[in-house]
């Protein structure tokens, strides 16, 4: 099944043709809400237009005895709200849970025409995506839906990371992947207790600085390292290979806006297109970080103009630009145009 061509376009102008094309719709912030929480649900209509994606969460963070209420709440909100430019996503319960079959059956039947993407947690391999793909196809056919619902997988088990390439290529419905640092840390038996972000114990220390007598002259500086670099880099490569989108994930320390911005920016620089938002103030951070800066766009456009037919090399501000730096600039220009559209 391949959705209508005009709904799709390549990941980046100038980039090699992806193996498949997914909608180039901005999704810098995927804002999570709990549809079983009436106070949170009441705020959803006012958030339309302020965020690229609103996601009704049915999985972790929703209490077991509120699962049905969350599912019913999402149906009610989706039916009552005009989402305009904002996409509506959901995170269903895990595939081995007692709730997931009812999640998919109810949501596709009741609000399948409004649902853009289904986020699937704890994906272990291609077989999980095949299962969801088949079920969605059956339910879509029964409901008479014409637009396919896309699938987004959370990378949050060691096995999922090992199988990341096959997960990305498991279905033309695959829209993207998110890092799930909390579950992944537990599955890997990492010794952390956080949801995303760094850790003060994960660091490198500079070599001793000795004075003339061979004695350490000052305390050695330490530098915190990024616990998530390896996984994000793997995820970005797998997504780029299959023409789908990589995302950071949750950053749980809501009060630490500076560290949140740092993590988001690292992910953006490494190739991610967006992240999750667990609190309205993280939407602004994500929108800022996952949009190219005015300076970057201006520079990228200068390189594009200077490179003429796109081949050869030119000097700009003392730096060499060539076919390859042009391709990087086109990624930036394409993203800016996509966000401005
Ligand atoms: C998200 O689901 C996570 O486990 O970090
Ligand atoms: Mg998780």
Image (cartoon, rainbow, N blue to C red):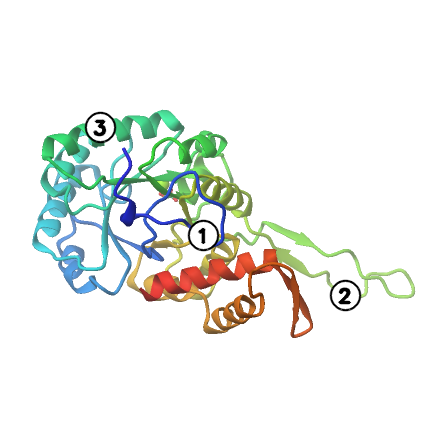
Q: State which tag comes first along the sequence, 2 or 1.
A: 2
Kindly state the secondary structure of the residue where label 3 is placed: helix
Q: Quadrant of the N terminus?
A: top left
Residue 181, can we see it? yes
Q: Residue at x 69, y 73 (%)?
A: 318
> Would you say 137 lies left or right of 301 here?
left
Image disc number at residue 319: none
Q: Which residue is mark 2?
A: 218
Q: Nearer the viewer, residue 121 or 338?
A: 338
Q: Quadrant of residue 82?
A: bottom left
Mark toward the viewer: 2 or 1: 1
Mark toward the viewer: 3 or 2: 3
> Would you say 224 lies left or right of 245 here?
right
Q: Nearer the viewer, residue 166 or 222?
A: 166
Tag 2: Cα neighbours inside 10 Å, few (<14), some, or many (≥20)?
A: few
Q: Residue at x 67, y 69 (%)?
A: 319
**Number of numbered markers:** 3
Q: Residue at x 41, y 33 (%)?
A: 169
Q: Which residue is mark 1?
A: 272
- Residue 263 lies, in percent from the top left, at 48, 57
Q: Which residue is mark 3?
A: 135
> Would you say 270 lies left or right of 245 here?
right
Q: Quadrant of residue 97?
A: top left
Q: Nearer the viewer, residue 130 or 122?
A: 130
- Residue 115 lies, in percent from the top left, at 19, 45
């Amino acid at each position: 099944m391949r959705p209508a061509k005009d709904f799709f376009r390549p990941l980046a102008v100038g980039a090699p043709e992806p193996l498949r094309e997914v909608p180039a719709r901005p999704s810098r912030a995927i804002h999570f809400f709990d549809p079983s929480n009436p106070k949170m649900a009441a705020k959803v209509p006012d958030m339309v237009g302020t965020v690229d994606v609103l996601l009704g969460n049915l999985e972790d963070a929703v209490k077991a005895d509120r699962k049905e209420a969350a599912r019913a709440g999402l149906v009610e909100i989706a039916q009552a709200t005009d989402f305009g430019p904002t996409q509506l996503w959901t995170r269903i319960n895990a595939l081995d849970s007692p709730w997931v079959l009812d999640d998919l059956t109810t949501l596709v039947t009741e609000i399948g025409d409004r649902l853009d993407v289904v986020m699937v947690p704890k994906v272990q391999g291609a077989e999980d995506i095949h299962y969801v793909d088949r079920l969605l196809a059956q339910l879509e056919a029964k409901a008479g839906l014409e637009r396919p619902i896309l699938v987004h997988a959370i990378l949050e088990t060691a096995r999922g990371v090992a199988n990341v390439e096959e997960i990305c290529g498991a279905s033309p419905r695959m829209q993207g992947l998110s890092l799930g640092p909390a579950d992944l840390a537990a599955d890997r038996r990492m010794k952390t207790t956080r949801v995303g972000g760094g850790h003060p114990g994960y660091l490198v220390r500079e070599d001793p600085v000795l004075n003339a007598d061979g004695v350490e002259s000052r305390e050695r500086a330490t530098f915190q390292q990024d616990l998530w670099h390896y996984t994000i880099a793997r995820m970005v490569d797998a997504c780029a290979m299959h023409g789908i989108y990589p995302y950071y994930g949750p950053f749980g320390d809501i009060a630490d806006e500076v560290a949140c911005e740092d993590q988001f920016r690292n992910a953006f620089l490494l190739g991610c297109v967006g992240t999750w938002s667990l609190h309205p103030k993280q939407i602004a951070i994500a929108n800022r970080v996952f949009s190219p800066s005015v300076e970057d766009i201006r520079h990228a456009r200068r390189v594009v103009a200077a490179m003429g037919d796109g081949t050869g090399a030119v000097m700009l501000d003392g730096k060499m630009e060539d076919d390859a730096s042009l391709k990087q600039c086109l990624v930036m220009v394409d993203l800016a145009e996509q966000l401005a559209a």
